[in-house]
Image: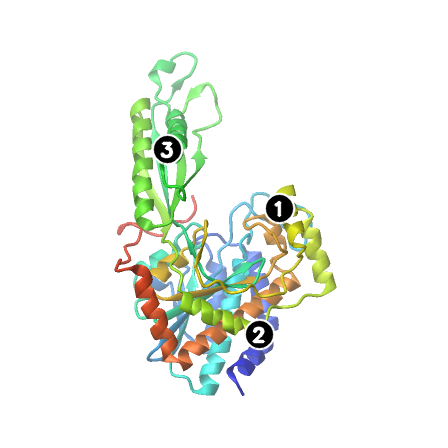
Amino acid sequence: MTYLDIIERTVAEHSDNLKSVADTIWSFAEIRYEETQSAALLADELDKAGFSVTRQAGNIETAFVASYGEGNPVVAILGEFDALTGLSQQGGATRYDPIVKGGNGHGCGHNLLGTGALAAILALKACKDELGLKGTIRYYGCPAEEGGGGKAYMAREGLFSDVDVAFTWHPWDENLAYNARMLATNQLYFTFRGTSAHAGFEPHLGRSALDAVELTNVGCNYLREHIIQDGRIHYAITDTGGRAPNVVQAQAQVLYKVRAPRMDQVREITERVKEVARGAAQMTGTELEITFDAASADLVPNVSLARMMHREFEKFGAASFSNSEKEFAASIQKTFSPEVQARVAKRGKILSEDLNAFQEEPTFLHGSTDVGDVSWLVPTGQVYVATEAYGTPPHTWQMVSQGKSRYAHKGMLQAGKVLAASAVQTLMDPAIILAAKAEHREQLGGESYIPLIPAEATPQRLR
């Protein structure tokens, strides 16, 4: 029996339970560093499967590492399971219909991501046992990918220090071996404290923290013209100081997110944003407190791993979908904005049933992921697998609605197969890891990993 046969059989044997796990995590919809139930469910599944599980890994409450085997090589599968705030949504609905108004939802498909990685590690264990493969396999339960930098904290605690190669995947609207760079990012809170006063009787005695927030935002709007083309500055006002217009607001807060292609560029832009905020404090006579929130490194692609994963993907092929599944996906597409619908119409695609051609030259995606921190330490390969209607924008209610669909389950299981097969290849052929590590050294160009998270920072729940 070949490794492909073992993987197909194992995933089929576990498919019903895997779908149940994914749907249960979808229902938990736990956000960053609050994924207690989701992490426990996945850790329990691995415990039952014979893995040695370390919970609260790296002193991070919802991180865990499950290990099987011993010796080298050490091959890692990365799993995520956090949701997004404000995206509560009924499953299987074709209109916006939150379960809980303002609640959480899996708007990036991490219920599928973590469970697809579980499918992969179970199939990988079966191959290791039945084919007598040497080495150690690990599942990394990674919390807080959505803006919390979970993997950055795990990396800082040395949890990846002996890993030879890592694999992961992401739900998407197409099927491809991922070969792209992504932006580094960090987030900081700027909290201003002033003096309250009656805005009618004694406004001259007040010092407005809200004015300081607004001046910070105005200053950063001007700053955008003077940073690099691929730099990004985002913000959200998290505390306006109250709802009374006739009071000078004594406290206000804004959260800033800075992105750039490299970590050193993020550091430089962040310092300029800090200076803007300090200037706003001076102009308003307020006190400023700067609090680090989270960060992640830029993603370092590994072409040799991506190429190998593409070959393994070809062996399984993309999932195929039924007419009823396509009908539901088409109804979801009708809810997209006119601009997205126009783009979808040009492709004439409802659900992706083909595998994209492999691109040898890495591209660039203007998003961010804490997989980047792992990729600086370890050669890392990824695939993106169709689990949603073509054109579905990430971080939307439409994504949440499709998170328990039959086609989402199909894509999730297909991802597990490709991850498992890719990992098996590295256990069977040491040359793959050697080539990946040589490329990794070349991609880094002599740079060392210096995380964006400060040494004193600790994982932060969403405020």
Q: Residues within 10 Å of mark 3 (few under 14, many from 20)?
A: some
What separation in Å lies between label 1 and label 3 (alpha carbons)? 30 Å
Image quadrant assignment for residue 449:
bottom left
Q: Which residue is labeled 1 in the image?
A: 340
Comparing 219 with 17, the one in front is: 219
Residue drawn at (44%, 30%) of the image: 240
Colouring scheme, one of rainbow, by chain, secondary structure, one colour:
rainbow
- Residue 242: x %, y % from top left: 46, 28
Q: Is residue 226 above or below residue 17?
A: above
Q: Amino acid at mark 1?
A: Val
Q: Answer whether labels 1 and 3 touch (C-beta < 8 Å).
A: no
Q: Residues within 10 Å of mark 2 (few under 14, many from 20)?
A: some
Residue drawn at (53%, 71%) of the image: 313
What separation in Å lies between label 1 and label 2 (alpha carbons)? 30 Å
Q: Is residue 165 above or below residue 180?
A: below
The residue at the far top in this view is 201
Pointer 1 or 2: first along the chain:
2
Image quadrant assignment for residue 16:
bottom right
Q: Which residue is labeled 3 in the image?
A: 223
Comparing 190 with 391, the one in front is: 391
Q: Is residue 16 above or below residue 100?
A: below
Pointer 3 or 2: first along the chain:
3
Q: Amino acid at mark 3?
A: Leu
